[in-house]
Amino acid sequence: MPSQPAIPPLLWSHLQPASSKGSLGLVTSVLGASANWILLRQIYAALKVPSDQPVEATAVILVSWLRGLEVWKDGARRLGLNLSPNGGITCIDALQSGLGLQGDGIGEVEEVLLKAVDEAKATSTRILLVLDGIDFLLAATEITVEDLLDCILELREHVHSSIISASADYPLIQRQHSPLEVDHAAFVMSIAHEADVIWGVRELDTGSARDVSGVLRITRGPAIERNERVPGEDFEEKELLYFVGGDGGVRVFERGS
Amino acid sequence: MSFRKRNVGLSSPSSQSQAPVSGTQSSLIPGVRPSPLDGRPTTSTGTSSLDDLLGHSGFALGNSLLVEENGTTEFGATLLRYFAAEGVVQGHSVHIVGVGEPWGRELPAVVKTAGVESAKPEAQTAAEKDRMKIAWRYERLGDFGTGPSSARAPPAVNRTPTSAISSGIESTAPTAFCHTFDLTKRLALLDGNRLNYIPVRPVPPDVSPFQSILHALREHLASSSSSTVHRFIIPNLLSPALYPMQASNPQHLLQFLHSLRAFLRRYSTQLAIMMTLPVMLYPRSAGLTRWIELLSDGVMELSPFPRSSEAGPPMTASGSATAQEEIPQGIVKMHRLPVFSEKGGGGTLGDDLVFTVSRRKFVIKPFNLPPVEGDAEAQRGEGEGKPTAVDIDF
């Protein structure tokens, strides 16, 4: 039904390295530019591998701390994805369950997610773990940056690849006055140094425009060189504009086009 | 042939009423109507220009709106009072946190003959009927694309008291979506629609003061029927006058807002939250404020102009009393819109908007610089040009 393809053509080549073994993708967003649409398209790319590639089907585990399931279901439906274990996606609604907020904190997170990973392994060994808004735990609980990074490292050992989304607003990254700000910056920087690909969305620098929602910057992370993972040959760092319509359809285009 | 048939289909709904979508359950609940964009239930903030700004020609239920205010003025509180008063008038369940009964006694009264959109008399001029047939459903869709700019005139006309007076119809029709309120009069609270005040209870320094608030809200939501709409109002969040010191501890505060967000999503057809935050005390450059914003669905910032009433005359030296009402009193910035921003949209958020508060309305509209003083021609052009510009745009 959507007139444009589910994945804008300009994005395809950049979605490939994110699906190699052990890779980590970081998606950053700001207040006025949400990154859900990128996460959904990355999930789509992981699930709908072109049939000429001899790889096993991927199972996705999506954990979201800031957004309800409805938003994800709504967005997935538009892409033709079925947001259920049958459709290859296990969803953990950490907004309703308050995962990690009470009791054991980070231990609970690790336990619940490892259990979900084990269950998903019944259907596929190739698992993509998507942690949306896990930086919230850092701000709202006593969990330390080290605990959180340890937990993520542990989880990454059990899955094929992972994607983490976090806020990169100026007050959270640059200011670094309060413990909250210092911790947030430390966490996002650490993940960025571990990442293979960094996807940053932000508002248009030059003010608002009716036909542009924001700017997407795709950057090679340090881990690509370190791990000698060869990204797709046509992978190049890029800054693109995008537009998300009121119906959820997405257009990605170069500046000036 | 088929073209003719379609024409018949089109004309029938407009002759019955202006209810955007008929037959859905949500249209039966007073003060709730489906969004013209995607049919999700929306309610009114009590401020029609703010409703239009929020993109679904209403405030989508299951969402929160954070109003940040610079300075020591109380414009945000006015918006909250409209929101509360609209809820009372519609028979919604209205909960107010932290403040006592005096706050509720200040709610503005409904202008008696206001805002009847559907109870128009049959005896309309042919021209008006024609206009409605073609445009009644597109007007609102147009609003979404163009933001708060021009195309608002036709629905606004329907809401103004004068049109209702001329029609001679009482405003008691239950289908009115957004009422007009008079800030100088007080809303009479009947027993049936008493406001529910949730106090901030004193707690030991290491306990979250928000626990009891959450508990109260949870009980109210769980014990009410699924057709009750709840409006949850938090005036001056974190203000030291209302909250103990530990309220601004990120762990207490952010977990509270996170739980509210969970409530909003669980009761997505029943609950709407509006709160104000004094950004003088909690500046937007701070990480904590940014997290408060990230946990809200809509974020708007009011920056009143730093001038008092005596500074008015220079701009409207030749203006009449009505022109004086149009003097903008501050800048409005939309940092985030409910629903739209969560999908990833943006772009229309950064428009220059101003607000004007007068006795009967809180208007948010695009900002245009006034003509240079002494430029009589331009000033005259401004006064007359506005309605025509609207017409052309429409």
Image (cartoon, helix red, strand yellow):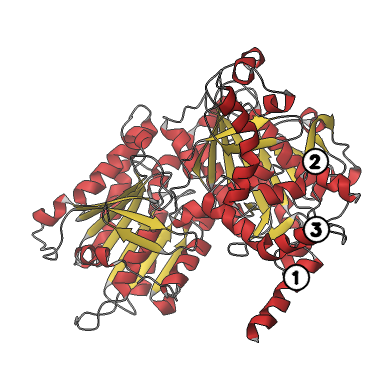
Q: Residue A240 versus residue B277: which sits nearer the camera?
A: A240
How far is disc 2 from disc 1 in space, using C-alphas?
Answer: 37 Å
How packed mark 1 is, by other alpha carbons closer than 10 Å (few <14, some 14-19, many 20 or more), is some
Q: Quadrant of residue B302?
A: top right
- Whether discs 1 and 3 lie on one chain: the answer is yes
How far is disc 3 from disc 2 in space, using C-alphas?
Answer: 28 Å
Residue found at the far top of this picture: B310
Q: Quadrant of residue A172?
A: top left
How packed mark 3 is, by other alpha carbons closer than 10 Å (few <14, some 14-19, many 20 or more), is some
Q: Position of residue B37 (x, y in %)?
A: 58, 62
- Residue at image x 13%, y 56%? A224
The reply to whether discs 1 and 3 touch (Cβ–Cβ < 8 Å) is no
Task: Report the mark closest to the observer, 2 or 1.
Answer: 1
Residue found at the far bottom of this picture: B1
Q: What residue would you read off at disc 2?
A: B195
Upstream in sequence: badge 1 or badge 3? 1
Upstream in sequence: badge 3 or badge 2? 3
In the rendered structure, the residue with mark 3 lies on which chain? B
In the rendered view, tell whether residue A121 sits above or below residue B59.
Answer: below
Tell me the element at label 2: loop
Q: Position of residue B40 (x, y in %)?
A: 62, 62
Q: What residue would you read off at disc 1?
A: B13
Q: What residue would you read off at disc 3?
A: B118
Taking the image as shown, residue B228 lies to the left or right of residue A7, namely: right
Rendered-image quadrant of the N terminus of chain B: bottom right
The reply to whether discs 3 and 2 touch (Cβ–Cβ < 8 Å) is no
- Residue at image x 63%, y 57%? B139
Taking the image as shown, residue B241 lies to the left or right of residue A34, namely: right
In the rendered structure, the residue with mark 2 lies on which chain? B
In the rendered view, tell whether residue A57 sits above or below residue B44.
Answer: below
Amino acid type, residue under disc 3 in the picture: Ser
